[in-house]
Image (cartoon, helix red, strand yellow):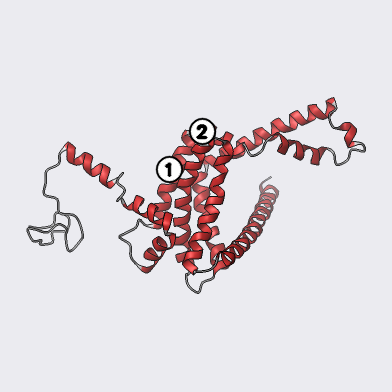
Amino acid sequence: MNCKNCEYNLTETAQFCQSCGAKVVQDRITVKKLRKDFFNDVLGWDNAYFKTFKTFLIAPNEVALQYISGTRKRFIQPFTFLAIGMAIATFVFNSFSEEYVNVSSSIQDETFYKQLFNFVELQNKENPADYVGSEEYNAKYVIYRDNQIETNKNVQKTILKYFNIMVFLSLPIYTYIAFIVFGRKRFNYGEHLVINAYIQGFTMVFSVVFFFSGILVQPYFYFLSLPLAIFYYLFTYKKLYNTSWGVSILKFLKFLVILFITIIGLMILGFVLGFLGAMIFG
């Protein structure tokens, strides 16, 4: 008997091909067999994706280390894992786009807009206490608030539209910062890329869970996905580098400082490029 995939000569009792590793299939296809294969291979808890997910939930370092060390069969590849998580999040967020915009904007309440307005509007007022609450003040505030709400919704829609691109572009940036913070002694940049792909793929799915919690229970529940993402980032690197929680938190604070500087730098670069573009093509 020969393997139907690579023609390797097999014994009659072989369950898998010794050459290519394919499963030996001799039974005819039936609807029952197709249904069983679908639930086992796609939805089954032993599916490579679910196996990777549930292991990462408990021992994220094990998933990353096995892939980095060369064990590639047990868990799904990091970028496939990220792509699946990103596809799930993109599908859900776009399917509930209005809810996504409303939940994402919920943190900016009336108090938030009023504080921003007061900061801008009361700077040059001689008697701000008398001005606050006046008809002019209230009219200007309503216009300001409505404009800010509309701007924020447009920003959220833009984020939703380019969600996949933003995730892929942010991955090498996060990875490079992690490379700087945690060092190259144990893992090189490529290996840090693997670690961060697994972390982002994992937290993408949990962001969907908290998103539904935000819709069904309380909008602020959605934002709990951020501390969870921070926790798993710390938990993963703590396990990988065998450090204490104190050291891990200090390194994460360093990560945030570098990330903030990087964002400011990118904003300045974008402004300069936009200004030069306007000068050249305007």
Residue carrying label 1 = 88
Classify mark 1: helix, strand or loop. Answer: helix
* Precedes in sequence: disc 1 or disc 2: 1
Q: Check disc 1: other Cα within 10 Å, few if <14, some if 14-19, many if 20+.
A: some
Q: Is residue 26 above or below residue 161?
A: below
Quarter the C terminus occupies: top right
* Disc 1 versus disc 2: nearer the observer: 2
Residue found farthest to the right? 126
Camera-nearest residue between 272 and 240: 240
151 left or right, relative to 44: right
Q: Residue at x 53, y 47 (%)?
A: 225
274 left or right, relative to 44: right
What residue type is disc 1 on?
A: Ile
Residue 172 visible? The answer is no
- Tag 1–tag 2 contact (CB < 8 Å): no
Q: Check disc 2: other Cα within 10 Å, few if <14, some if 14-19, many if 20+.
A: few
What residue type is disc 2 on?
A: Leu
Residue found farthest to the top? 135
Residue carrying label 2 = 216
* Spot occupied by residue 36 in the image (x, y as percentages of width and height): 22, 42
* Spot occupied by residue 174 in the image (x, y as percentages of width and height): 54, 58
